[in-house]
Amino acid sequence: MSAGASHWSGHWRPVQAFVPPRLRVDPANPPKEEWLPVGDALLHLDRYLPDRPAAARVIVLHGGGTHGGFLAPFGVMVQRQGYEAVLPDLPGYGRTQVVDRRGLRYSDWAETATALVGHETANDPRPLVLLGLSMGGMLAYDVAGRRGDIAAVVASCLLDPSRPEVRQQISRTP
């Protein structure tokens, strides 16, 4: 898959049966699938575009063990409120392509998400909100601190993986 290519793979489909109908992806208006080179990775994105020009964008960041397609209901929710939603598959998850999954660390996620925000804000003055779920909440907070130009952060929880007791709880092996 080349950067910028777009097609509808529907990798978010398995989630649809488990969410209320109002938060299901409309097959007539599916997310636009995009690919963005970031460092050594080819980042997969789903972009949910509203019916009218959006005044702001929301990047939805997933936690460990999932991917952007799993959070399709959040993309739909943002889209139906008239905003643009961008749901990346962070390195090591979903359809994002990386050289070596075994070597990935939280810092790789932070660098990737920061680069994505830079890409999104490069030529677009609209406000950008970061919405993070689970470890994605800490990631949203970290990226906002690095950038300084984020309009708002919405986070479900804040895990600090630099703390040994947190690493012990979120890792399979110490």
Image (tube, rainbow, N blue to C red):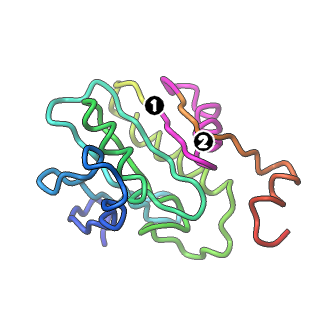
Label 1 element class: strand
Instruction: Give left or right: position of 20 versus 138.
Output: left
Q: Which residue is mark 1?
A: 129
Q: Quadrant of residue 173?
A: bottom right
Q: Residues within 10 Å of mark 2 (few under 14, many from 20)?
A: many
The answer to whether 91 is drawn above or below residue 72 in the figure is: below
Judge depth for marks 2 and 1 and give the one in front: 2
Looking at the image, which is closer to me, 38 or 141?
Answer: 141
Residue 133, x across and y down, in percent: 55, 45
Q: Quadrant of residue 36?
A: bottom left
Residue 14, x across and y down, in percent: 34, 67
| Identity, as a three-letter code, of the amino acid under mark 1 | Val
Q: Residue at x 31, y 62 (%)?
A: 17
Distance of label 2 from label 1 (alpha carbons): 12 Å
The answer to whether 9 is drawn above or below residue 21 in the figure is: below
Instruction: Give left or right: position of 105 versus 85.
Output: right
Label 2 element class: helix
Looking at the image, which is closer to me, 75 or 126?
Answer: 75
| Identity, as a three-letter code, of the amino acid under mark 2 | Gly
Q: Residue at x 34, y 25 (%)?
A: 126
Instruction: Give left or right: position of 162 versus 128.
Output: right
The residue segment tinted magenta is 129-152
Q: Which residue is mark 2?
A: 137
Q: Earlier in the sequence, mark 2 or mark 1?
A: 1
Residue 137 located within the stretch drawn in magenta:
yes
The answer to whether 99 is drawn above or below residue 90 in the figure is: below
